[in-house]
Amino acid sequence: MTGSDLIVQILIDSGVTVCFGYPGGAAMPLYDALYKKRDKLKHIRTAHEQGASHAADGYARVSGKLGVCIATSGPGSTNLVTGIATALSDSSHVLFITANVNASEIGSDSFQEADIAGITNPVCKYNWVVRDPYRLASTVKKAIRLACKGRPGPVLLDIPHDILSYQFPKDYTPDDTGDDLQEARSPEVPEVEDDTVSKIYTLLKNAERPVIIAGGGAVRSGAYEDLSRFAHNTGIPVASTLMATGILPYNDPLNLGMLGVYGDPDAVDYVDRADVVLALGMRFSNRTHGFVSAGKTVIHVDSDISELNKNVEATVPVNGDAKAVLASLCGKFDEDPSKEEGFGRKYRKKLTRGPGDTGANRPGKYLFSEAKDKIVSDAFSMIKEKLGDVFVVTDVGLHQMATARLYPFERPGRLITSGGFGTMGFGLGASVGASFACAELTDKKTNTVLVSGDGSFRMSLVELAAVRENRIKMLILVLNNNVLGMVREMQKEFYGRRYIATESHLSMPDFRIIAKAYGLSGFTARDLKEFEKALDSYIIGSKPALIDLRL
């Protein structure tokens, strides 16, 4: 048994069934071990290591299982950095395994040598360079536990070529001996005391204008059923961050929509006027904390203690699990002898949004324009009607905000996007991983839709090769307005319309032809009628398809 055989067997024993990566010289022992176990652990080669990093991330987000990404030394490993940072920002549990030069050659400027542990230290939950083969088993097992434990995140193992090739004695039995490799970096989430829950309940009950803001942590904790129950018992409306899109069904009257710079007007209005804010599993990033002005009572619940009082000073900071806190609050309401129909209802106004209203005709800033937003929202409604419950993956830009605001999500966790790091080029790789996760969940590969922009899609379109090679039946929708829309909007609003490097009129490719070159079905749609015809062709066809919707 070699070191590589040991790694592959530990992954299989840990329930890993698919991994993503790109081979190279230093990683060949690991790929040879994958070949031997290819019936139990499937390897998916992408066109670029960054695509593999996003694929492992997308797989982890959809499946709930560990994502695994493998790369070779030097440029192979450095190509993962953006994907690692993306996973860290959005708390995605991914194990990155990189090969390196022989341990004795580290520091000698060997061919394709890189200090990937040093490079990635700021963007990893933790990382190690494994120099002792007899600590390999314990290190891999602890890396897997650390990636998934507490607040999830990416962990990197950098393993020299000679450790991967090391031949263990025939009587060697791996064990968990070795150092306690900083498992304290991911402590257990403490239980919240009853006195704290009672304080939260009293503050909300006595509030004049209470509001709840749900973040990605609330989705990860599985708090959505308790959130819905508590919100409807009390009548307190719920705003969400980008990462919590769909935590209440889109047409739920208590769903205010997304909070943020490009958020829904109701969400911005309610949070701005609120006197008591219950924030669940969110980081208060610069896109949201500006709406929580001074003078509000802020109750901040997060499983990661380092997020408390970091960007917003909380009146009641609570290090705890969102689901557990909401379940306890529901219990307090049920036991309250003086409970009213719902103490949050005394401030509520009638929302302008009703069932079937996608938001395109509501007051507030439009994303593209009033007419274009209407086209996009109608296209989304067609996708929902014809494809049913799908995972929607996005890149980053105006199309991402349009998806969060206008797509009729009915369940949490159905939007897969780069939130905290804002990674353009995330979408297509993540869609590949999400599609494999869907195949495991539903025994078919028809559950993924990618919504991208013309700028973001050009950053990753080489991954169309992975889509075709693996026969992934997915839909790609490019919202094509021929510019880098979000950056151009900034130039318009803040830089006196001095447009530079944002227009693509002469360089814009024909995405339909590119899709066909990769073996996909390709369509160009200039209106909703053409879009519906293309969508129907995708549904009845056997190939993945790309629809270039011109806006």
Image: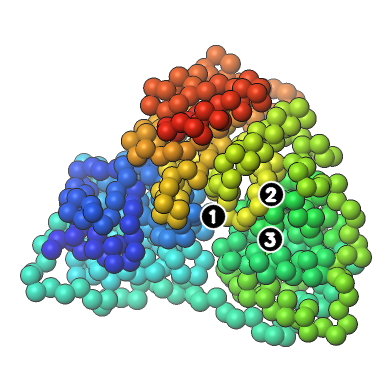
Question: Based on the displayed image, in which of its 4 quarters is residue 23 positioned?
Answer: top left
User: Would you call the spot at circle 3 few (<14 residues within 10 Å), some (14-19), or many (20 or more)?
Assistant: many
Q: CA distance from mark 2 to mark 1?
A: 15 Å
In this view, the residue farthest toward the left is 170
Residue identified by numbered label 3? 214
In this view, the residue farthest toward the front is 540
Task: Kindly identify the amino acid type of the residue bearing the numbered disc 2.
Answer: Arg
User: Would you call the spot at circle 1 few (<14 residues within 10 Å), some (14-19), or many (20 or more)?
Assistant: many
Q: CA distance from mark 3 to mark 1?
A: 15 Å
Ranked by sequence position, the earlier of labels 2 and 1 is 1
Question: Based on the displayed image, in which of its 4 quarters is residue 203 positioned?
Answer: bottom right
Residue identified by numbered label 2? 287
For image coordinates 37% across by 58% down, the residue present is 95
Residue identified by numbered label 1? 90
- The secondary structure type at the circle numbered 2 is loop
Q: Name the residue nearer the viewer: 443 or 22.
A: 443
Task: Kindly identify the amino acid type of the residue bearing the numbered disc 3.
Answer: Ala
Q: Name the residue nearer the viewer: 463 or 281.
A: 463
Q: Tell me the quarter of the image containing the C terminus.
A: top right
Q: Please say whether residue 275 is visible from this viewpoint.
A: no
> In the image, residue 185 lies at what x, y percent?
46, 70
Asked whether disc 3 touches disc 1, contact meaning CB atoms under 8 Å apart, the reply is no
